[in-house]
Image (cartoon, rainbow, N blue to C red):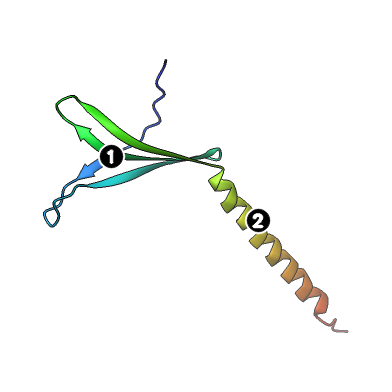
Amino acid sequence: MAIKQIGLNLSQSYYYSGAKPTREVDIKRSLVGDIYVALIAMDKSTQLINLSVLIKPLINWIWIGGSGLVVGRVVVLISFYWRQKPYMI
């Protein structure tokens, strides 16, 4: 089985104010879907990691569709404004 590398950067940080580590989530975005990967645990002795992976399909199409609705509404409002404007003769 071949492993495909997708170039995600995961990190785990320790801050002085808290005893628990904080983890950063990395997101790989595409038109097909978004992949969210978080580093949950790391074992230094066995060099194994525990990951949380969420795949959200077609998320960017929601933004593209919403933008299309906004552009369409602006076009309709502009055309409505021009139709209501009286002609100067």
Please state which of residues 55 and 26 is positioned toward the viewer in this rendering: 55
- Position of 78 relative to 14 (above/below): below
Residue 62 in the figure: left or right of residue 73: left
Residue 34 in the image: x percent, y percent?
A: 48, 41
Mark 1 lies on residue: 40
The amino acid on which the numbered mark 2 sits, given as a three-letter code, is Gly
Which residue is farthest left?
16
- Image quadrant of residue 6? top left
Residue drawn at the location 24% of the way across and 27% of the way down: 48
Q: Label 1: state its secondary structure.
A: strand
Residue drawn at the location 34% of the way across and 45% of the way down: 25
Residue drawn at the location 29% of the way across and 46% of the way down: 24
Which residue is farthest top?
1
- Image quadrant of residue 32? top right
Mark 2 lies on residue: 68
Residue 2 in the image: x percent, y percent?
A: 41, 17
The disc placed on residue 74 is none
Location of the N terminus (image quadrant): top left
Tag count: 2
Q: Label 2: state its secondary structure.
A: helix
Q: Residues within 10 Å of mark 2 (few under 14, many from 20)?
A: few
Residue drawn at the location 31% of the way across and 37% of the way down: 9
